Structure formats: structure tokens, C-alpha cells
Image (cartoon, coloured by chain):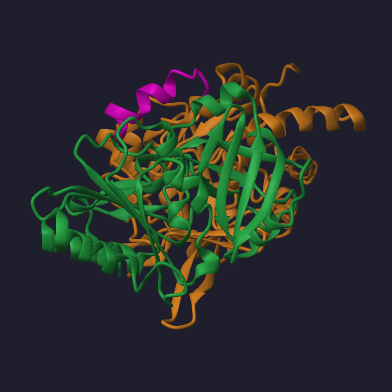
Amino acid sequence: MKEFFLNLGNLKLNTPLMLSSGTWGWGENLSKFLSLAEIKYSIGALVTKGVSLEPKEGNPPPRIAETPCGLINSIGLENPGIKEFKAKYLPPIKLYEIPVIVNLFGEKIEDFVGLAEELKEEVSGIELNISCPNVEKGGILFSDNPKLVKDLVREVRKIWNSFLAVKLSPVGPVFEVAKSCERAESDALVVANTYPALTVLSFKPLKILKGGLSGPAIKPLTLRLVWELSQRVGLPIIGCGGIITGKDALEYLICGAKAVQIGTANLINPKSVAEIMEELEKLLKTYGLSY
Amino acid sequence: MFEAKVFINQREGGEYYLLGLRVSENLAKKFLPGQFLKIRVSSTLDPLFPRPFTIHAIEGSKLYLLYRVVGKGTQILSKILPEEELKILGPLGKPFPEIKEPYIICAGGAGIAGFGYLLQKTSHLPLKIFYGVRTKEELVRVNFYEKFHVSLTLVTEDGSYGTKGLVTEALEEELENKFKKYKPCLLACGPLPMLKSVLKVAKKYQLKTFLVLETFLACGTGFCRGCVIPLRKGGYTHLCIEGPTFLAEELDLERVFS
């Protein structure tokens, strides 16, 4: 196994691969499908499913639909709330002895600050989901307003010294939002969340599913974002979008990402991360590259 | 995921196929009746997700699946030839619950598939099996089911074979005539309209009923939280980790069938 150390602010990674938020449940079934050795060998950090202050039961069915080379999901941020998350779900995740990054979402800036307060000294980092509506600004998405994002990151930063990443939406004023994150002293950008999308489930009665598109269908789009952002923003970028193979991961790393997140691939094959890591190492050797 | 070698993939009748996969004996032993596996039907990116199938029968290291061609995934699967290798993931989901009371199986179409392995493994056979399809070509694997010496009522909607009508009408007639005093449990699997009718019958005779449900699955492992089933007490359960078999009274049936 190759030694890999990457410093992203206060976060040290032993591999460039992270498990993306919402694609490995609450970790309760992870060790059923991956051995401890595979987890340690391949996963640099675990990014948890999104957590809010209060529990959320999530959206009614249907929540998911397959589209060509992709998946539309509308899970609705189902989560047990920060208190139960800390008591029940976080302790077993920490037993893997891999950096844990908690994905946070809220309806207003104070929600994010409150969540960060709850996690102080508990985890290696936080990832702010800004693809959610701000109720104090008439429901506009945080990610649609660069100033709002700057205020959000600044306020959370005041009380959070460890690793802080912002997960960008791939739509809206992406470059301005990225600059705001830089100015507000975020440690890294996760590029990016799913793409707003829609699929028709049936014609009669008409049934549609609106949600976020992920999977290989979005890879060229997000890869371009990673490339452009890496040229314009000084923050380290964590690429996230449609990585299924080691080759996909290498493409992101070559196009400007310092690390990558594996998401939809975990849903296709729970062992994906181990297979991607193995393939990535072989490719790096083949091309004489290092990370 | 595990490698499995196809040794049979033959059309049984209608759009129904029997797929045989050879796996390690160790893996085969892990499957319990009612559980399912997922098959990557193609190494391309479309379709992207492996498709779920219940276990129909197991003989040593040979797994049998009985499936109906319903979409792109099963269409591709139906073209796979013996000696080809497929990637599979399983066992997934929970087995059928242990039913101590006398029980009747009611199956519609491909819903019959999973009960084969139950009959192979259980020491507590059902009182009767009602198996209904639209027309006689769709009655498949009847010889296999007859081997277990359980009363098997075959029902076709068009009357081309066996009893004419809906499988739930045959079930109701049986209950009306013979089972009023016994109050058996029902174990049902089939299309949603059929399950809805099963529940009407179950309500009339106040029978405890287990439903085997289907929905689109992405992960099958509990990772995505996509396959939710509404609960009567509020909130949701997840088909892939808590199902696919549920006690009907625990579900918010109106929302399940909406």
C-alpha cells in the first residue's frame, strides 16, 4: 500500500477517496460489505449523511428513479437529528478510526452554527450543504446567494476551528459562491452536489420525480467545474460526481481535485471504493504519476 | 459482489424465465427463503443498477431465479447465455417471518417465485397455495410446485386453465367454504392490485396477513434510503433492509397503494 498524506487544512487523509454523504446509510451496514482492511486501505474520510438540528423523516415515496447512466433522488434529508445522531450513530462510525466529516444542513445560519457547536471536539470536520432553502430570506437557496454563503461560512468559522468544507451546488452562481467560501476561510470546496433534474415515471396518471441527478451521466459536467474552479480559486477542491472507476477518480485528480468523493458507485456495488482505490493505484503506476 | 456462472437461462412460458447460477456452496448456504440478490445484468453504464430478484430455489451450489421480463434490465438478462459470468450481490433483505400458525400462500404472476425456496426449506408447509396468472402460458414451474404435495389451486383470468377468475376470488371462495373456523394466516406476493384484494379478503375474515412488497431499489443495502414504505404509526421503513415481507397491519396501506 502506498503511503498517502494530504493536508486539507486540519484534515489529514491517508487516501484520496472519501465516501460521499448519503451514500453509505448511517454506516450501520458498511462492515457487512467491506472488511476493516478494505475500509482502512481505501477510505480517506467518511462524510456522513446530512444532519439537521431536529429529526426529519424524509420525503414520501417514490424517492428514487434510474435514468440513463444516472440516478435521480429525492430522499428529503431523512435523518434522526443531531442529538440522536451523536448518541446512536456517530460512536460506531468513529470506531473505524478514519476521519469523520459530518454533513450539515439547516434553514438558517444559526442552525448551522448550532450544529457545529454540537460537534465540537467530536469529529474531524464538517461539510456544509448549501443546496437548501434559507427560510429567513424567503426560501432562496443558500447556494443562489454568494453573500449569504459568505455570511454562513464566516459565522460557522467563528466557532469551528477544525476542517470546514462547503459542498457547492453545480448550478447557480457557482464561481462567485466559491470565491465567497475562499474569503470566508473555508478549508476546501466539495465540487459538487447533484444536479436539479426531473424524470417522468408514468404518463397516465402523470407521475414525475424531481430530485438531484447523480452518477456517470453528470461526470463530464462536474469534471469541467472542477477544472475551471481549480484555476480560479485557491482552495483545495474535492471532486464529487459520477466516479465509478479508478480511471474516473484519476481524471478528477488530474483536472485539479486534491481528493474525490465516491457516491452513487456505493449504491451500485458496496465494495466500489476498494475497487476504485486498487484501480487508481495501478493507473498511477502505469502512468508514472503520484498524488 | 460475487461472480456467478450461468448454467441455464430458459424461457418457461409467457415472459417468464428460469435462470440458474452456480456460486460457491458457502454463498448458497447463506440465503434464507424470502431473501433476494441483485444481479449486474450488464457491464455498461445503462442500466446502471443491478436488478433485484428473489431466490426461487437452491440445490447445493446452484441458485435458481424465476423472473418475468418487465423492462430493460430483465430484457438484457433474458439474452444471457449459459457459461456467461454475472456479478451478484447477496443475500439481501430479511427472510420470510417465521409463521407458526397454519397459513395459505396467495401468489400472482412472478410473485410465485420466492415461495419455491420456502417450500424447499420449511418444515411447516402451507395449507394451500393459490397461484394466479392472466393466461395459461404464464403458469410456470407447476411441476416443481407440485412436488411438495401441497394443495395447489391454479387460476387464470381468462379461464384457459384451472379455475377462471382472479386468484383472490378463488382464495375468498375457499375461505368462505372451509376456513372460517381455522383463521389461517395469509402470505401474499404479487402485483399491487392483487395485494389490495388480498387485504380486502383478509379484512373480511380477520386474517393476519404478510405482504411481500416490491419497489424500485437502488442500493439494496440500506445505503441510499430510497425504498421507503409508509408505516401506520407514522414515518417509514426501508424495504431493502427491513423487508421485503411486512406484516400488513403495521403498514399505512392507503399510502402503500396510492
Q: In terms of depth relative to the viewer, which is nearer, B129 or A272?
A: B129
Q: Is residue A112 left or right of residue A282?
A: left
Q: Position of residue A241 (x, y in %)?
A: 64, 50
| Residue drawn 46% across the image and 54% down it | A130
User: Quarter of the image containing the N terminus of chain B?
Assistant: top right
Q: Position of residue B140 (x, y in %)?
A: 53, 57
- Vertical arrangement, residue A108 with respect to residue B137, above or below: above
Q: In terms of depth relative to the viewer, which is nearer, A227 or A289?
A: A289
Q: In terms of depth relative to the viewer, which is nearer, A275 or A110?
A: A275
Specify the segment rendered in magenta. A85-99
Q: Which chain is the one coloured green?
A: B
The answer to whether residue A175 is visible is no
Q: Which chain is the one coloured orange?
A: A
Q: Quadrant of residue B3?
A: top right
The answer to whether residue A96 is visible is yes
Q: Main secondary structure of the magenta part?
A: helix
- Vertical arrangement, residue A280 with respect to residue B49, above or below: above
Q: Residue furthest bottom?
A: A204
User: Quarter of the image containing the C terminus of chain B?
Assistant: bottom left
Q: Is residue A235 left or right of residue B205?
A: right
| Residue drawn 23% across the image and 54% down it | B251
